[in-house]
Image (cartoon, coloured by chain):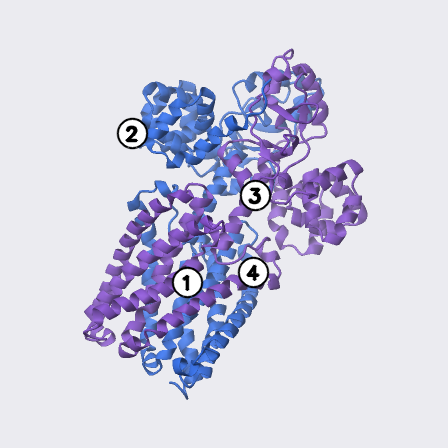
Chain colours: A purple, B blue
Amino acid sequence: MTDIEPQEASLVARLLESWPHLAPEERLQTFRGLSADDSEDLFLALDPRANAELFLDFNRAERRLWLRFLAPDDAADLIQELPEEVRPEALQLIDEKVRREIMALLLYREDEAGGLMNPRFVRVRPDMLIAEAIRYVRQQALSVEPIHYVYVLDSNQRLLGVMSLRQLFVAPAEKKVADVMEDKVITVPDEMDQEQVSRMFQQQRFVALPVVDKEGYMKGIVTVDDILDVNQEEATEDIQKMGGQEALDAPYPLVPLKEMVRKRAGWLMLLFVGGMFTTTAMERFQEEIQRAVVLSLFIPLIISSGGNVGSQATTLIIRSLALRELRLSDWSRVLLREIVTGLSLGVILAGVGFLRIVFWPNAKTVYTDHFVLVGIAVSVSLIGVVLFGSIVGSMLPFLLRRLRLDPASASAPFVATLVDVTGLVIYFSVARLILSKSLL
Amino acid sequence: MTDIEPQEASLVARLLESWPHLAPEERLQTFRGLSADDSEDLFLALDPRANAELFLDFNRAERRLWLRFLAPDDAADLIQELPEEVRPEALQLIDEKVRREIMALLLYREDEAGGLMNPRFVRVRPDMLIAEAIRYVRQQALSVEPIHYVYVLDSNQRLLGVMSLRQLFVAPAEKKVADVMEDKVITVPDEMDQEQVSRMFQQQRFVALPVVDKEGYMKGIVTVDDILDVNQEEATEDIQKMGGQEALDAPYPLVPLKEMVRKRAGWLMLLFVGGMFTTTAMERFQEEIQRAVVLSLFIPLIISSGGNVGSQATTLIIRSLALRELRLSDWSRVLLREIVTGLSLGVILAGVGFLRIVFWPNAKTVYTDHFVLVGIAVSVSLIGVVLFGSIVGSMLPFLLRRLRLDPASASAPFVATLVDVTGLVIYFSVARLILSKSLL
């Protein structure tokens, strides 16, 4: 009997970490050099995109072998990652029965329950005795892996109930399945969005959930390991959108440069055109700047502070909406909170800003004889701009959700651009008011 | 035989969604009003913080009942959420044996494998026959739920191998456990950081992994549903940091206002003080502004564009580092990519900016007689600032990781502040160069 071999066990893990960093030829060579066990483990652990890349480099025999090795849902994912023109050929490598399973899966969108599910699961009939069911499950266990639950279907494949393998294991042999099974089954509609499916797993601790179509026929199971991938994908998408760009849909190092520029240029251009309103706003205050250049010194500081607070607020709210900690109807409570928070933060920054100006070495030379008034104007503006930043940053995600757009699009740059324009107007209006009898 | 009852099944789900929005009294009342089944499901599905809140409102009998109802790891999580002074009392409600299990768990940090694990698992001996093992597992199955794997331990509790319940199920009854078990076991050290544990689950599709201490003694199992929570937590932390603030550690609506202000004020103040360098930078260019106020019009537009590109780059790189798509050693490849991307994006914005200035209605009046030169100066600056934004945004996360700090701290506001200061210097230097014989 051998002992645990941690070295051996982590070879696949190490390969997984280094996989994106290998050249395509190296990948094929490395893969072919692995033991049968390790190559199987690796092929199962790689994501569909990486598998598809390997697949394209395989010879015909390898393609056949490895495509058949995958469960139908994983095979479908791989095929979906192949170039359109290779797909029919790939499907021809698989047996008729499995091919039909895969083609049924390919009809679903990738991001709905049907696109996630595994069409193979262990089933029993309600009128079987437990002892019979156990024998029947043992037969199926050879071809279905892994098993978490045993599903009870009627002769029309409608889902009637469910038992965990453990329940089956401990039930008295002479009882009927129908008497032991759980008949309140939580099911996932086959067209449910994957985000919603993920939420069901997050809320209740299932290892697998059955997928049923509109008529109640059971189509497959979604397992929690698929949900790990879904969550990672969704968080990545949100984070990328929150950075002010389209989601990339692939790991950063694998996105072609041209696509990267395209995905970033769209929002950037939109923000740039929006940002042009700062120029228009500034035009209205040219005279003030001419008369008191000192005012221009604080423009970047003031508008950036508004943008920073806005960035804080928008990331907090976007994430809370995504996790359902907040609902659309909470907007007014949040508004109130952000007004108080924004005022507090504004007062803090205003205090620091005021001291910075008034106690600056030779403030008089740099900030004119009216440096105290300048300090007051900057401080009051800061309170206004920071408050406005909090409000825009926190309300924009609600507004987007209300308009059925993705709240994650309320990116830090988007909020900052909105706050920039208004920030300038606030600053110069306050300056006019406070400095009208001295500097202006 | 009853049919599926989707209404009934989703009551708990609906309660979970509305839970954060209920007042504390309403929660207790709602909870007490539930059927035994539903209240059990709800209590299992709520997070430890929510459970602890309920617990504090319970009477003594309820406290006893519900604390005993939880698995030891969940009970430990609940107790960790209780105020320090209530904990000893809570521990007294539990039987001696379980109390010892819980106290052992409380010794682990919340964010390491030992703090995540369930100390109960199903075990067999290597020299048992499969038929014996099945009987032995059936006995344990009554108290351990759920079962995914059966662990093979020697008499010293050292882990020798593992079998899935399915493997046990299909193995010939007369074989020995040692001959059927998988002896290459992937294990998690009890002090491994939860992020690393999560990566193991993400890479390889396990439902549960055994936790062992330094001596190889098995301490418990981590299951994939715990990993769902870990991932959600970690993504939330990253997102909040990327917004330019400390992570909140609790859902937005539950964070007290004072704490919220504190967690946001720290970074905000730091960014504000950093932003003051924009004022210092501007002071050096006061003369230029005095002579050509038109230059000030483009300050917000130019520095924001740099910040926007920087925000894109930093979010992409932070996420890719978190997902291990990128490694520290990839920095030079990324730098090259971002230089090309930044130049491309800069040229695009520069083109739009140039056209905006030159073809503006009465450009001559607004942008002076030298409006074409102004357009050129703005465009050239844009290319420089956007390029600089790409570089800073992409390199800062690498630098932080190199310094063993959290790359997620390279927030959009942080990058924007860095780019603001340099952006001003770039803009005015370019303007001096291009406009020295005309406007300046």
Give amino acid for label 3: Val
**Which mark is drawn over residue A417?**
1
Q: Vertical placement of B53 versus B420: above or below?
A: above
Task: State the separation of the CA atoms marked 1 and 4.
Answer: 19 Å
Q: Which residue lies under the disc numbered 2?
A: B85
Q: Is residue B322 visible?
A: no
Q: Earlier in the sequence, mark 1 or mark 4?
A: 4
Secondary structure under tag 3 reads helix
Q: Residues within 10 Å of mark 4 (few under 14, many from 20)?
A: some
Secondary structure under tag 4 reads helix
Query: Hey, which quadrant is residue B277 in on the image?
Result: bottom left
Residue at image coords 39%, 63%:
B417
Give amino acid for label 1: Thr
Task: State the separation of the CA atoms marked 3 and 2.
Answer: 40 Å
Please state which of residues B327 and A296 is positioned toward the viewer in this rendering. A296
Closest to the camera, between mark 4 and mark 2, is 4
Q: Which residue lies under the disc numbered 3?
A: A230
Query: Hey, which quadrant is residue B339 in on the image?
Result: bottom right
Disc 2 with disc 1 on a shared chain: no
- Specify the quadrant that holds the N terminus of chain B: top right
Q: Which residue lies under the disc numbered 4?
A: A263
Disc 1 with disc 3 on a shared chain: yes
Instruction: Using the image, name the chain to which the residue with label 3 belongs.
Output: A
Task: State the separation of the CA atoms marked 2 and 1.
Answer: 49 Å
Instruction: Please say if the residues under marks 3 and 2 sit with CB atoms less than 8 Å apart.
Output: no
Task: State the separation of the CA atoms marked 1 and 3.
Answer: 32 Å
Residue A17 image point, x, y percent:
59, 48
Q: Residues within 10 Å of mark 3 (few under 14, many from 20)?
A: some
